Every structure is written in C-alpha cells, then in structure tokens.
Amino acid sequence: MKKVLGKVLALALVLALSLSVMSVAPVKADEEDVMLISAQNDYEPYSWYPVVKDKVKKFSADGENGVVANCYYERISFIGFKKGLKKINKTLKKLSNAYSPDDLYSYARAAGEEGVNDVYYDNVKSDVTYYDQKYVCVTTYREWYAGGVGNYFTDGYVFNLDTGKRVYITTVTGCTLKQIKNAIVSSVKNDGEFEEYFNEYAEQIKAYVDGLSAKDINFYINGYGKVVLLIGPYTEPFYGGWTREYILEDLPCVYDVN
C-alpha cells in the first residue's frame, strides 16, 4: 500500500512540475516563436509579447569590409479578452509598418562604397511601461546611428483598454491643458538642466509649451504611475540628439493609478 501511495504521490509531483513549466514556457505566436510576458495582475485577462522585424543588410565596395546596417523594429502585440486589444494591436502594427530603414541603408551604401568599415543601426524597441484596468502604455525607444553622432528617440502611446483608442494627456490626467502647460514649465525649471541659465531660455521654453496642443504632447506613464513628458531631439531650446524626459510632479489633478 505504501509503495502504491508513493507512486501516486510521485506522479502527482511530476504532473504539478509539468504544469508549472508549461505556464512559463515559450508559446507559439501567429508570427513567430516568442516568450509570453505575463501582465502579472489578477484583475485583467490580458498579456503581450514582442514581435520583431529584422532587416540587417551589408554594403561593401570590395565584398569583405564594409558597413553593416543593423535595422529592426520590435512591436508589442496583445492577447486576451479586453474589448480594445484588437484595435490597439492594429494601431501598433500600423506604426510598425510605417517604419522604414531606407534612409539608413542609403547612408550605409554610400559609406560602404567609400571603404568605410562600421556598423550603422536604426533599432526600435518597445515596452509596456504601465498597465491597469483602464489604460495600458506602450513606450518605444529608437536608436539611430549612421556615423558621427547617434540619435535617440522615445515615444509614448497610452490606450484605453475598453475602446482601444489612443488617449491624450488631458484625458489621462483629468487636467486642463493650461494646468498641464504650467506643470511642464515648472518641471523643466526644477529639473536643473538649464541651471542658472534658465531665465535666459524661459521665453523660448514658454513659447514652445504655449504652442502645444493636447495631441502634440508626447508622454508615457512609467511603472510608478507617473506621467513623463517627452521632448524630442533638436527641439529648441533643448538641443541635443536625444529625447528629454521630465516627470510632471506638479500636476494638480493627476490620474490616480493606485
């Protein structure tokens, strides 16, 4: 009897371990093998996985040395039962399809014909930086280099999970556009980037902020539920080839994500 009981317990343990492994094993997506990333919450039945388009080419004058153009786009695809997921996936796929490395290929081809030996890249990575019962935020990070100075771009996309529509900063925060603009100026000043020279650039900063509509304001929600303003490369008077990030701490009506 003890032997039989022992065998039954051993079988049960093996089955339990098998189910545990299955829960974290890679799953077959429609487009390719990917690792399922759990949304890690108990209140919404949805998850996501990355889909990568890889477009690597080499351009060379002599067939050996040359310029490798390393280009890829990683987008997020959602799975689950929320009403808006299908529409969100459609929007993200449209953004992915709009990506083109043709300009980088042109630079790489010209440099390769001149005998340059280098690696150029135009890569886009995506991440789900925030999610809850109502909103999900997908943030993309683009790195671009074709000799000289590299450029870095960050963009945020916040979606309503029920409708699948992209929502803008006024909707997410519940603030008026005026309140948001005041918070932007305050956050830029408090960041300290301009240090004692802030007053010299204050008029330019205010003019830039005043010209923004709600749709113009690029932002994402981080893992702490904070709204992070994004200002793109070469935006005067911020300059530089990278996206500036400012956490908007002074919003008086920020969306309660807790």
Image (cartoon, rainbow, N blue to C red):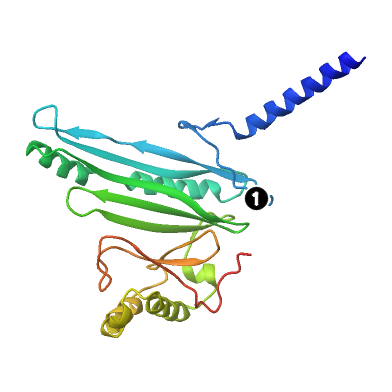
Please report the residue visible at 16 percent of the width from the left and 41 percent of the height from the top. 108
Please report the residue visible at 38 percent of the width from the left and 73 percent of the height from the top. 213
Counting other residues with Cα less than 10 Å from the Cα at mark 1, is it few (<14), some (14-19), or many (20 or more)?
few
Q: Is residue 122 above or below residue 113?
A: below
Please report the residue visible at 47 percent of the width from the left and 45 percent of the height from the top. 76
User: In the picture, which quadrant includes the C terminus?
Assistant: bottom right
Label 1 sits on residue: 41
The residue lying furthest to the left in this view is 114
- Pinpoint residue 229: horizontal percent, then vertical percent: 42, 67
- Total numbered badges shown on the rendered structure: 1
The residue lying furthest to the front in this view is 2
Q: Which amino acid type is marked by label 1? A: Asn
Tell whether 28 sits left or right of 124: right
Q: Nearer the viewer, residue 230 or 85?
A: 230
- Pinpoint residue 135: horizontal percent, then vertical percent: 56, 58
Q: Secondary structure at mark 1?
A: loop
Indicate the quadrant where residue 115 lies.
top left
Please report the residue visible at 25 percent of the width from the left and 72 percent of the height from the top. 236
